Image: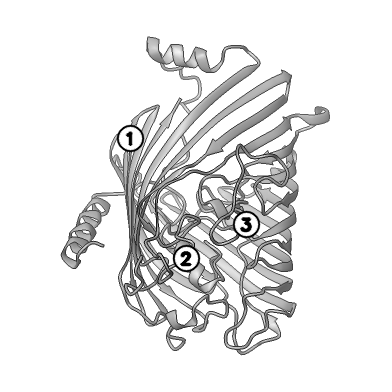
């Protein structure tokens, strides 16, 4: 575990990197902007002989193409799972190797068959406190040396779908099968983004059927989605190798804690100048599969408005209300109501205001606000916890998705019971170099987390979660190589019993072919 002085050096270095700049992006973290299209009518760039060979190799026929990528991450985190320095394995380090190969075939005009295979073995370079590789005896067991070494996992088909564009001669797109799906602002997808939070950022897919109608005459797109997501990775399509038992669950690795069924109705209208208005209804039905899974029927009604206020100003404002019922087997604080189905009465909001300098360095300043209701311990017959549905991914923090597990029955990235207010700055000091820095103040609307794995980790008489600082630097080395350095820090507040400093550090290199 780094010494106090080393921690300060790391913090200062990361702050310096963040203050030099930031990435232009639309969410509350410093991440790459959507790729820009070349100017209309511009000739395609001249390719080198090597690039031309790669292009030809990836598309050997007019009806077939393929590609591959490799992402290597080294992740160090301190206290972000244990929430205290007193835990023997509070500091962790793991190297993640994610490799993917994909292919697409177009047997007929407007019809494509798409497939992708992915695997992510992980090398634990410090004894593992968390995850499926930690020692089965646990801390303090007969042999609590912890798991260390290579954690070989299965390979999985994380995309397999048939897509038909201009279906029936109409502006209709139909996609059937395993597919990635996101709704909302780029890199700020709020409630639909990741159907497999149990494996981290290894996969994102949703097993679903999606129909998209582009009604251009009224400047509106309509989406209708039906999905059924299995908790077990090999329930529908076989995995490459047996998922095997995990330490946390002898039945094996899980993509999520319950089998999930859903319907999404989403409409996005651009009739007003420089304005996009979205409205949606989402149903999510949960059927418990693992010990901490839910049985639930959740109905979400939401709306979003985004656009430009003036030449330099942009904004986004989204809100949602949830009702239905849920039986969560882990609601035991302050009273055990784990066997009851409770009525849901929850709400959330997510807002951003940006000032775009439109200068050569692409400077941008951002203000962010978010509110996700928490479960009120005094209303034992109701459940006020906002459920982020399929939005369990590191939208505003890589660090905090793990810290949430301690207060949400072990569910990673199940964000709720938070109010965050923040500001950030992003810029591009040089071509292909982007940096960003963000500060958030985090609060807890409810002082008592009703789903805490260990209630002694929380003070239950404070509502300040802490100060959050994030700094990100990314560099595009070439069209085939990208890299980033990512750092996050939390100075915990009185919401926690311990005030021990939390830290997340990650260098990454990303290779594509």
Relative vertical location of residue 417 with respect to residue 438 in this rendering, above or below? below
Query: Which residue in the structure is indicated by mark 2?
Result: 137
Dot 2 falls on a residue whose secondary structure is: loop
Of the two numbered discs 2 and 3 in the rendering, the one whose residue sits closer to the viewer: 2
Query: Which residue in the structure is indicated by mark 1?
Result: 432
Colour setting: one colour
Q: Quadrant of residue 385?
A: bottom right
Residue ID at (55%, 48%):
274
Left or right relative to 452: residue 78: left
Dot 1 falls on a residue whose secondary structure is: loop
Spatial separation of the CA atoms under disc 1 and disc 2 = 47 Å
Between 480 and 38, the residue placed more toward the observer is 480
Q: Quadrant of residue 13?
A: bottom left
Between 398 and 358, the residue placed more toward the observer is 398
Query: Which residue in the structure is indicated by mark 3?
Result: 256
Dot 3 falls on a residue whose secondary structure is: loop
Image spot of residue 446 (x, y percent): 52, 82
Image spot of residue 248 (x, y percent): 55, 62
Spatial separation of the CA atoms under disc 2 and disc 3 = 24 Å
Image spot of residue 206 (x, y percent): 66, 47
Spatial separation of the CA atoms under disc 1 and disc 3 = 36 Å
Confirm or deny contact between disc 1 and disc 3 (CB under 8 A). Answer: no
Of the two numbered discs 1 and 3 in the rendering, the one whose residue sits closer to the viewer: 3
Quarter of the figure that contains the N terminus: bottom left
């Amino acid at each position: 575990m780094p010494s106090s002085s080393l921690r300060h050096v790391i913090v200062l270095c990361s702050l310096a990197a963040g203050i030099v700049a930031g990435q232009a992006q639309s969410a509350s973290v410093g991440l790459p902007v959507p790729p820009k299209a070349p100017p209309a009518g511009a000739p395609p760039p001249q390719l080198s002989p090597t690039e031309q060979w790669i292009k030809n190799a990836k598309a050997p026929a007019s009806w077939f193409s393929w590609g591959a990528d490799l992402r290597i991450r080294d992740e160090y985190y301190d206290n972000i799972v244990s929430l205290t320095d007193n835990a023997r394995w509070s500091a962790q380090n793991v190297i993640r190797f994610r490799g993917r190969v994909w292919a697409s075939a177009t047997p007929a005009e407007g019809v494509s068959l798409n497939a992708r295979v992915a695997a992510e073995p992980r090398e634990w370079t410090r004894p593992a406190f968390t995850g499926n590789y930690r020692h089965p005896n646990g801390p303090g067991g007969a042999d609590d040396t912890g798991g260390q070494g290579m954690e070989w996992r299965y390979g999985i088909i994380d995309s397999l779908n048939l897509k038909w564009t201009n279906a029936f001669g109409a502006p209709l797109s139909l996609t059937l099968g395993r597919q990635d799906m996101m709704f909302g602002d780029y890199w700020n997808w709020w409630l639909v983004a990741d159907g497999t939070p149990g494996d981290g950022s290894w996969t994102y897919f949703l097993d679903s059927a999606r129909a998209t109608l582009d009604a251009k005459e009224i400047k509106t797109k309509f989406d209708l989605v039906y999905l059924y997501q299995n908790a077990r990775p090999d329930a529908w399509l076989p995995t490459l190798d047996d998922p095997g038992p995990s330490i946390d669950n002898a039945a094996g690795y899980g993509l999520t804690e319950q089998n999930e069924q859903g319907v999404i109705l989403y409409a996005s209208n651009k009739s007003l100048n420089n304005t996009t208005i979205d409205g949606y209804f989402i149903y999510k039905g949960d059927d418990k599969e693992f010990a901490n899974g839910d049985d639930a029927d959740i109905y979400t009604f939401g709306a979003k408005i985004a656009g430009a206020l003036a030449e330099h100003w942009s904004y986004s404002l989204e809100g949602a209300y949830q009702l239905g019922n849920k039986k969560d087997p882990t609601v035991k604080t302050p009273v055990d109501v784990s066997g009851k189905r409770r009525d849901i009465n929850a709400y959330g909001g997510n807002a951003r205001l940006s000032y775009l300098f439109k200068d050569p360095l692409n400077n941008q300043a951002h203000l962010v606000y978010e509110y996700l209701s928490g479960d009120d311990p005094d209303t034992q017959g109701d459940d006020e916890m906002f459920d982020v549905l399929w939005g369990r991914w590191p939208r505003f923090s890589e660090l905090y998705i793990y810290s949430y597990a301690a207060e949400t029955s072990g569910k990673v990235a199940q964000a709720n019971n938070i109010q965050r207010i923040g500001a950030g700055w992003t810029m591009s000091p040089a071509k292909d170099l982007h940096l960003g820095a963000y500060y958030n103040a985090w609060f807890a609307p409810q002082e008592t987390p009703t789903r805490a794995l260990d209630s002694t980790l929380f003070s239950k008489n404070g509502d300040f979660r802490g100060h959050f600082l994030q700094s990100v630097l990314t560099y595009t080395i070439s069209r085939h190589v990208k890299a980033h350095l990512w750092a996050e820090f939390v100075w915990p507040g009185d919401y926690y019993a311990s005030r021990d400093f939390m830290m997340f550090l990650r260098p990454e290199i990303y290779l594509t072919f």
